[in-house]
Image (tube, rainbow, N blue to C red):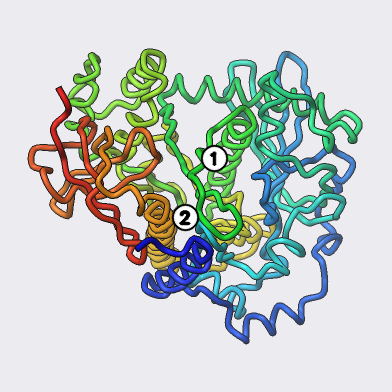
């Protein structure tokens, strides 16, 4: 008997709340948090006399179509000799979320917003994250600005950080901006309504493309995975929609990477500790070498991000349709990122996937707690004050944020799998081509090639390894637990 389609959304919401609690996350705000937020009436705008007044610049936000918690704005300025000045303004969330407050306590517990198929669990109450601390269009806001110069070759120079009063003149979306930048659409109406903004977006895009080329020359990895979002028809799951990158998402990605680098170097220059975002040198490099060899490419025996990027570039050109599957395999073998507390002058390991040594998270304080911690460190450095955290506190926070990020990811994945199980529960017994995405003592996993769904191989998994192609049959689904189980079958001859 199939689940009543009219109840899909409620089923997923119930699952999300339950799994949040099981993973040590708070699905709801306490009465103390809500009462504290109700008392906040002041909008952070002109309270900092030292802030630069940059409201006249053509600032805009670019985010998902449905995003309301807007963390950053961007703007560009053309400089002599082919250089471009890029400014990234990040919402001053600390101005209204005090360290040690009830709101801060909730944010510190969860450490991140959790976005599930049926419901969002924001790190901060909506009155803050979508209103008072969101960089909404036509609203004056205090921000922390990362100011940098992009050279003609795409390298980033002359980074600085300071407080600034800004005003967003347009709320833009990745899809429409990306389509326009790529020549497949018209300039978004919200952008054309602001004098000089279309030209400024072109300037931003050109700088971002130079930055992207330079990053990949240095060994940043070109990875392109398939991300599927459940689509609802009323309250029933009707499909899985793939989300893809475009020029607009790349623009924001490159600017945020650069701003995070400027931020952590600024903290180091001011003798401040920091929380770094680290992706270690891959422990399963030997398997990455094997995957490359299976695709006709020879990698060195020791981890080398430049060589891996060369392989990925050639693989994408040769097999663009299946490249997302290869990307997923490499990501699984690289291992997850984590947070690490660093004293100034310490030899940080860096981020293998981005091929950068100086990296943090700082540009999304409405959505991630490490970014709010970094913002407090920045503001203390700017004011010449002592750091608000001891190194022991930062070490504990880094470990906690890594743990809670993993928990949040598992919540999102389980709800996504429950949604996929709802979609597939009428297809038990069907056979699919698949690629192995995980192989360890705890289980073997495969992603279907025709439907963007991943499940566990419970029969016939012996000898399978990450990156191999196989043929599977859907044997069962469990909506409540988000289980999708396959067994391997022989291909038809």
Residue at figure coordinates x 69%, y 38% from the top left: 147
Disc number for residue 275: 2
Helix, strand or loop at mark 2 = strand
Quarter containing the N terminus:
bottom left
Left or right of residue 301: residue 347: right
* x then y, percent, for residue 310: 36, 17
First reached walking from the N terminus: tag 2 or tag 1? 1
* x then y, percent, for residue 140: 85, 55
* x then y, percent, for residue 304: 29, 26
Q: Nearer the viewer, residue 218 or 241?
A: 241
Residue at figure coordinates x 71%, y 67% from the top left: 128
Category of crowding for the residue at label 1, using alpha-carbon neighbours closer than 10 angstroms: few (below 14), some (14–19), many (at least 20): many
Is residue 244 in view from this perspective? Answer: yes
Find disc 1 in the rendering and name its residue: 261
Q: Nearer the viewer, residue 11 or 354?
A: 11
Q: Nearer the viewer, residue 364 or 436?
A: 436
Is residue 115 in view from this perspective? Answer: no
Q: Nearer the viewer, residue 89 or 470?
A: 470
* x then y, percent, for residue 350: 39, 41
Residue at figure coordinates x 52%, y 47% from the top left: 268
Helix, strand or loop at mark 1 = helix
Quarter containing the C terminus:
top left
Residue at figure coordinates x 25%, y 38% from the top left: 431
Left or right of residue 227: residue 143: right
Category of crowding for the residue at label 2, using alpha-carbon neighbours closer than 10 angstroms: few (below 14), some (14–19), many (at least 20): many
């Amino acid at each position: 008997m199939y689940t009543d389609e009219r109840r899909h959304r409620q089923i997923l919401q119930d699952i999300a709340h339950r799994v949040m609690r099981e993973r040590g996350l708070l699905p709801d705000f306490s009465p103390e948090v809500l009462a504290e937020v109700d008392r906040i009436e002041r909008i952070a705008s002109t309270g900092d006399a030292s802030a630069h007044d940059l409201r006249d610049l053509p600032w805009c936000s670019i985010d998902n179509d449905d995003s309301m918690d807007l963390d950053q704005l961007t703007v560009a300025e053309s400089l002599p000799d082919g250089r471009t000045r890029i400014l990234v303004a990040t919402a001053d969330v600390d101005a209204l979320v005090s360290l040690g407050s009830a709101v801060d306590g909730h944010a510190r517990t969860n450490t991140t917003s959790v976005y599930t198929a049926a419901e969002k669990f924001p790190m901060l109450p909506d009155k803050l994250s979508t209103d008072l601390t969101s960089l909404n269009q036509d609203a004056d806001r205090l921000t922390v600005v990362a100011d940098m110069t992009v050279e003609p070759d795409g390298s980033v120079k002359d980074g600085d950080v300071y407080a600034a009063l800004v005003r967003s003149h347009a709320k833009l979306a990745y899809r429409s901006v990306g389509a326009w930048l790529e020549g497949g659409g018209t300039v978004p109406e919200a952008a054309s309504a602001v004098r000089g903004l279309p030209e400024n977006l072109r300037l931003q895009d050109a700088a971002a493309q130079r930055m992207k080329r330079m990053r990949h020359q240095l060994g940043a990895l070109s990875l392109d995975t398939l991300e599927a979002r459940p689509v609802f028809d009323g309250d029933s799951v009707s499909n899985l929609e793939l989300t893809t990158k475009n020029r607009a998402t790349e623009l924001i990605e490159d600017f945020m990477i650069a701003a995070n680098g400027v931020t952590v170097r600024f903290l180091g220059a001011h003798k401040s500790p920091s929380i770094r975002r680290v992706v270690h040198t891959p422990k399963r490099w030997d398997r990455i070498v094997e995957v490359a060899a299976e695709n006709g490419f020879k990698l060195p025996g020791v981890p080398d991000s430049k060589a891996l990027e060369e392989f990925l570039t050639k693989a994408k050109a040769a097999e663009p349709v299946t490249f997302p599957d290869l990307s997923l395999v490499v990501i699984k073998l690289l291992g997850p990122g984590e947070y690490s507390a660093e004293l100034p002058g310490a030899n940080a390991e860096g981020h293998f996937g981005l091929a950068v040594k100086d990296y943090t998270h700082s540009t999304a304080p409405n959505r991630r707690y490490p970014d709010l911690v970094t913002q407090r460190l920045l503001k203390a450095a700017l004011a010449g004050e002592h750091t608000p955290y001891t190194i022991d506190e930062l070490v504990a926070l880094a470990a906690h944020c890594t743990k809670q990020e993993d928990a949040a990811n598992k919540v999102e994945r389980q709800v996504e799998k429950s949604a996929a199980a709802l979609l597939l529960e009428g297809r038990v017994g069907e056979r699919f081509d698949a690629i192995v995405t995980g192989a360890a003592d705890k289980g073997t996993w495969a992603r279907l090639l025709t439907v963007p769904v991943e499940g566990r191989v419970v029969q016939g998994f012996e000898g399978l390894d990450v990156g191999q192609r196989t043929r599977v049959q859907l044997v069962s689904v469990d909506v409540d637990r988000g289980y999708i189980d396959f067994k391997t079958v022989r291909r038809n001859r």
